[in-house]
Image (spheres, helix red, strand yellow):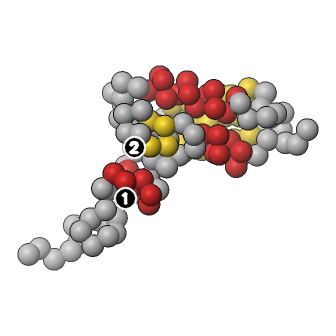
C-alpha cells in the first residue's frame, strides 16, 4: 500500500465545512499544519474562527473522521491551537474571501491603514 501523503490529508479536510459559515475549513485557513509519520499516523494542527466557537467540537470531530477515511491512515490526532490567531483576511483563500465579502473596495486584501484618508 502506498504511503499516505499530506496532499491526501488536505484533500480530505477540504470536504469538512464550518457549518455556521458554510465554507471548507481548508479554504477558511483553519488548518495550520498536517504531519504524516512513517507509520501513516496523521497529526493535524488547526484552529477555529473564535475561541468560543459553538461548533468547535463538531468541526474537530468531522476533521478527524475525514482524515480517518483516507486509505492507509492508521490513526489521527487533531490538535486545537490558538497561535497565531485566525484572521480571515490573511488566512482564507481568495475564493472564500470573495464569497464572504472580505475584499476591500479596490479588490485587494491589503490593509488600508497606509492609504491616504479622504
The image position of residue 57, as x and y in percent, is 47, 22
Query: Which quarter of the figure has residue 56?
Result: top left
| Badge 1 density bin: few <14, some 14–19, many ≥20, Cα 10 Å | few
Q: Name the mark nearer the viewer: 1 or 2.
A: 1
User: Does residue 71 appear in this view?
Assistant: yes
Please tell me the numbered disc located at residue 89.
none
Label 1, on which residue?
98
Residue at screen point 65% across, 45% down: 11
The image shows residue 85 at horizontal and vertical percentages of 39, 43
Task: Judge from the rendering whether residue 100 lies leftward or rightward of residue 29; answer left or right.
Answer: left
Q: Which residue is mark 2?
A: 85
- Asked where in the image residue 118 lies, by quadrant, the reply is bottom left
Direction from residue 95 to residue 42 in the image, left or right:
right
Q: Residue at x 26, y 65 (%)?
A: 104
Residue at the far right in the pictured view? 1
Q: CA distance from mark 1 to mark 2?
A: 21 Å
Q: Earlier in the sequence, mark 1 or mark 2?
A: 2
Q: Secondary structure at mark 1?
A: helix
| Circle 2: element type | loop
Query: In the rendered view, does 40 fall on the left or right side of 54?
Result: right
**In this view, 12 is above or below 112:** above
Q: Nearer the viewer, residue 53 or 80?
A: 53
Rendering quarter of residue 35: top right
Q: Residues within 10 Å of mark 2 (few under 14, many from 20)?
A: some
Instruction: Say whether residue 105 is left or right of residue 27.
Output: left
Whole-percent x and y of residue 62?
A: 56, 28
Q: Viewer-proximal residue, 32 or 3? A: 3
Quadrant holding the N terminus? top right
Amino acid at each position: 500500500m502506498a504511503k499516505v501523503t499530506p496532499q491526501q490529508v488536505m484533500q480530505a479536510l477540504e470536504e469538512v465545512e464550518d457549518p455556521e459559515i458554510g465554507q471548507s475549513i481548508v479554504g477558511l485557513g483553519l488548518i495550520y499544519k498536517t504531519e504524516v509519520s512513517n507509520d501513516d499516523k496523521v497529526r493535524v494542527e488547526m484552529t477555529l474562527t473564535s475561541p468560543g466557537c459553538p461548533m468547535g467540537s463538531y468541526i474537530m470531530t468531522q476533521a478527524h473522521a475525514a482524515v480517518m477515511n483516507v486509505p492507509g491512515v492508521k490513526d489521527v490526532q487533531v490538535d486545537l491551537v490558538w497561535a497565531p490567531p485566525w484572521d480571515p483576511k490573511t488566512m482564507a483563500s481568495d475564493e472564500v474571501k470573495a464569497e464572504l465579502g472580505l475584499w476591500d473596495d479596490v479588490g485587494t486584501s491589503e490593509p488600508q491603514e497606509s492609504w491616504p484618508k479622504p
